[in-house]
Image (spheres, grey):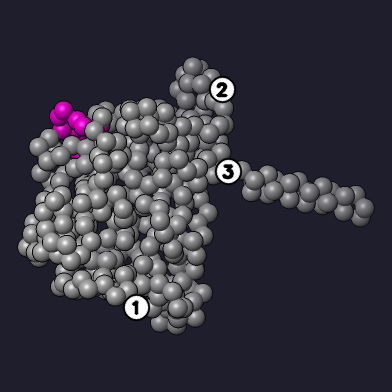
Amino acid sequence: MEKWLGSASLALTLILGWAVWDAAQQEWERVQRTYYRLALSGAQTEAEKEWARSQRIELKQLQLKERGTVERCVSCHLALENPMFRNFPEPLRKHSSLLESHPPKQFGCVACHGGEGRAVTALEAHGQGGILAKPLLKGDYMQAACYNCHGLKTLPPRVTAAVVRGRQLVNRYLCLGCHKINGDGGEEGPELSTVGSDRSWIWLYAHLARPQGVVAGSTMPVFSLNREEIKDITVYLMTLLDSRDQLKNLPLLAKRAAKDYPTERPEDERNHGDIKFAADKGAVKFAYDGNILFRGAGCNLCHMLGIRGGEVGPALTYIARKRDGENLERLLKDPEEVLPGGKMPQLYLNERQIKALVGFLSTLS
């Protein structure tokens, strides 16, 4: 009996010790351990194996002298140029062929993707750690970043289509009657010449959907805009930068358009030599706090929670009484499907972020 208790105590001590050690690891440390382990298992030559064994677990960063900053995205996104990881889930996925004309050591990540390049946690790096953070650019919102570096002349029309449509809508709705942009326009409303540097795309979207819900007492009228129109105007406004951000982009101006703008979806799995990698084998799970994510993703810009928040959308104080977890998950994945004709934007959240938000919202009863 004593021997059994001793063995059980030892096992429990080891389990608790491992749990404490694992909890103490930074997110980027866990990602790097996973990456090097997978790289070793998929290595085809002794040189590749030796490389994988010799790598140190350390904070990595890109020194971007032309932009006068550093970015630490590569502490997690280590497989950017490794073809073995072409179809792995993020953060261990090879980047598209756009890297051929946008090498990370020269351009970094933030210039195209937004977010907070200096951060070392996924929540903060993806711009979801606070209301003042700038979230990652995804989908059509990335067109603003393309335009800010390349302009219109060097890119295929479809790559800046949202920017062009947004500018046309600004003219159609006579926004310059109240707002000044680059010296032209009225003065009744705030100047918009640098609004892309001053506000995140989530704030801009929410304000266009219902100005008074974001800025109490705003005199801006509520226009009958649909989701696509709000998105396009938002993308255009994100191209209106201050001189500081314009100077950051000047060294990045491309002389020609990138050759490849891939649209194909990755396959679920691929073969590499004799080893078959499933797409989820390299998954590294980040822990998301639904409460923090609610604010960081900008939900409180549009929705009241208690006595705080915006009034663009319905209050969420008791949302769990009205919608169950499955319905909330569907809503966050595809707002248009659940609320056709509504104005809730597509937030481009991943599965873990959606589950964290649903978990938080399900407590609001």
Q: Earlier in the sequence, mark 1 or mark 3?
A: 3
Q: Residue at x 26, y 41 (%)?
A: 243
Segment tinted magenta in the rendering: 252-261
Tag count = 3
- Residue denoted by label 3: 26
Name the side, left or right, on which 236 lies relative to 296: left
Residue 83 visible in the picture: no
Q: Nearer the viewer, residue 310 or 270?
A: 310
Q: Residue 179: give x, y in percent of width and height.
A: 16, 61
- Residue denoted by label 1: 314
Name the residue type under label 2: Ser
- SS at circle 1: loop
Q: Earlier in the sequence, mark 2 or mark 1?
A: 2
Task: Assign the magenta stretch its main secondary structure.
Answer: loop
Q: In whole angstroms, how far apart are the C-alphas of marks 2 and 1?
A: 54 Å
Q: Residue 226: give x, y in percent of width and height.
A: 17, 68
| Name of the residue lying farthest toward the right | 2
